[in-house]
Each structure stands twice: as structure tokens, then as C-alpha cells.
């Protein structure tokens, strides 16, 4: 099956989506904040929350990856324009993370603070999945990755298989990181988490730049080719 689709396409798409989504979601850094937000809950409740959040995060990322670009195309936004805009947004977001990560962390912490009396089912999706874990930035990255899909049928299938596997892998990381958040706090600490966040932000900046370059190539390629004729 993978041989007919193209294993290289699956692997390349998996690595690209994994690096982009990991950089924006940052499961380790988010787990440190998750431990603070849920400090008043029992270990069993935190484990249940981590399972629910991992499942909901997978649904959010897969929906944005598969349906985000077609929905925008329905409204007349071309694939090239979507790649350029999405790549620029991702790159700008990554630049912000590189320069002021503490500001973003404080905003996410405030957005995810649960109201008194809310039960697990209520807080697992909102606000702990949206917007805390997979917020607008993650959705924008997933849509931009989906817009970067190839046009050939065989490569297209390989792309979505690889990207979908990456989204599910990130969801699995979220579940594991959140489920062991207390141990991560002790093992990593806030300083190392910030270093990891900076490295992830730089990787995300590279991903956003690559997506933008692909979009610009889609626009300028036919124009350059027509001038040579």
C-alpha cells in the first residue's frame, strides 16, 4: 500500500507536519502549565482530563488539516494565496514566540483557568483543548500544512496519510505529557522548558518560511515559464 502511494511522500509529510505541529502545540511546555492549572484536582481527574484532551486535540488538528483548506477554497481563496498567507502567519507567530514566549504562556494560562464548579467534561474541551492546547495558532498551522498538499493523486494520498499520522502522534504526546505533568515539572523545570520552547519556535519559523516559499513559487512559476516561451 505504502509502496504504491510513495513511502518517501508519507515520511516527508509526516516529518514536516510533526515538526510544525509540535512547535506550535509544545506538549512539554503546555504540560507544565497544565500541572499548575489542575493543581487542585486529584491524580485520577488529571489522568481523565489528559485522555479527553488528547482525543479532542486529535479531532481539532485532523479537522483543520483535512477540511480547513477546502473550506477556504470554497470561498474563492486560491491554494497559492492560502499557502502564502498561512506561511506568513505561522512565521510571524513563531517570531513572536521567539521574542516573547512568556507573554504567550501567561495569556494561555489566563484563558485556560477553569471556572468554579465546572466538571471534567466541560473543561476538557473548553478551555483546556480550545484554546489552551490546540488554539487558533495550531489550527492555522494545520490549515497551512493542508494547503501545502501536492496535486498528484498518489502524492496527495501519501501527504494526508503522513500528516494525519503526525497529528495523531502529537495528540498521543499531549496525552502522555499531560498525564505525567507532575513528573515533567520535576524532571525538566521551567528553565529547560523555555529553552525547548525557543528551539521549537525557531523550527516553526523555518516551517512557515518554507510554506510561504512554496506559495510564492506557485504564483511566480507559471509567470516565469510564460516569459521564457
Image (spheres, grey):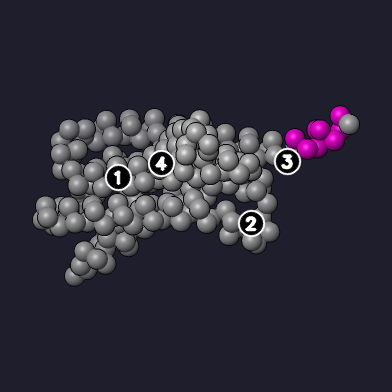
In three-dimensional space, the C-alpha distance between marks 4 and 3, rounded to whole angstroms, equals 28 Å
Q: Is residue 79 left or right of residue 183?
A: right
| Foreground: disc 2 or disc 4 | 4
Tell me: 77 left or right of 65.
Answer: right
Q: Residue at x 50, y 33 (%)?
A: 3
Label 2 vs label 1: CA separation?
30 Å
Asked where in the image residue 223 lies, by quadrant, the reply is top right
Instruction: Report if residue 96 is visible in the image.
Output: no
- The mark that comes first in sequence, 2 or 1, is 2
Assign a secondary structure to mark 3.
helix
Q: In the rendered view, would you say 217 is above or below 112?
A: above
- Contact between marks 1 and 4 (CB within 8 A): the answer is no
Q: Which mark is residue 166?
A: 4
Name the residue that disc number 1 marks: 172
Which residue has dot 2 on it? Answer: 73
Name the residue located 48 percent from the left edge and 54 percent from the top edge.
64
Mark 4, secondary structure of its residue = helix
SS category of the residue bearing label 1: helix
Q: Which residues are magenta?
A: 221-228
Task: Say if the magenta span includes residue 226.
Answer: yes
- Most common SS among magenta residues: helix
Q: Which residue is mark 3?
A: 219
Foreground: disc 1 or disc 3: 1
Categorize mark 3 by other alpha carbons within 10 Å: few (<14), some (14-19), many (20+). some
Amino acid at each position: 500500500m505504502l509502496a504504491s502511494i510513495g513511502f518517501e511522500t508519507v515520511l516527508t509529510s509526516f516529518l514536516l507536519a510533526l515538526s510544525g505541529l509540535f512547535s506550535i502545540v509544545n506538549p512539554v511546555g503546555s504540560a507544565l502549565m497544565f500541572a499548575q492549572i489542575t493543581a487542585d484536582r486529584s491524580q485520577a481527574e488529571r489522568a481523565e482530563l489528559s485522555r479527553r484532551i488528547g482525543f479532542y486535540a486529535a479531532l481539532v488538528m485532523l479537522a483543520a488539516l483535512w477540511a480547513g483548506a477546502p473550506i477556504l477554497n470554497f470561498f474563492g481563496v486560491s491554494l497559492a494565496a492560502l499557502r502564502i498567507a498561512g506561511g506568513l502567519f505561522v512565521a510571524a507567530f513563531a517570531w513572536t514566540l521567539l521574542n516573547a514566549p512568556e507573554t504567550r504562556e501567561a495569556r494561555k494560562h489566563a484563558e485556560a483557568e477553569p471556572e468554579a464548579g465546572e466538571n471534567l467534561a466541560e473543561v476538557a474541551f473548553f478551555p483546556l483543548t480550545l484554546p489552551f492546547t490546540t488554539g487558533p495558532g495550531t489550527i492555522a498551522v494545520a490549515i497551512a500544512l493542508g494547503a501545502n498538499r501536492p496535486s498528484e493523486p498518489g502524492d496527495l494520498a501519501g501527504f494526508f496519510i503522513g500528516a494525519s499520522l503526525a497529528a495523531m502522534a502529537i495528540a498521543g504526546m499531549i496525552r502522555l505529557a499531560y498525564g505525567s505533568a507532575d513528573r515533567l515539572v520535576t524532571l525538566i523545570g521551567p528553565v529547560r522548558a523555555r529553552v525547548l520552547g525557543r528551539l521549537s519556535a525557531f523550527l516553526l519559523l523555518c516551517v512557515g518560511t518554507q510554506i510561504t516559499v512554496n506559495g510564492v513559487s506557485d504564483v511566480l512559476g507559471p509567470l516565469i515559464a510564460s516569459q521564457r516561451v
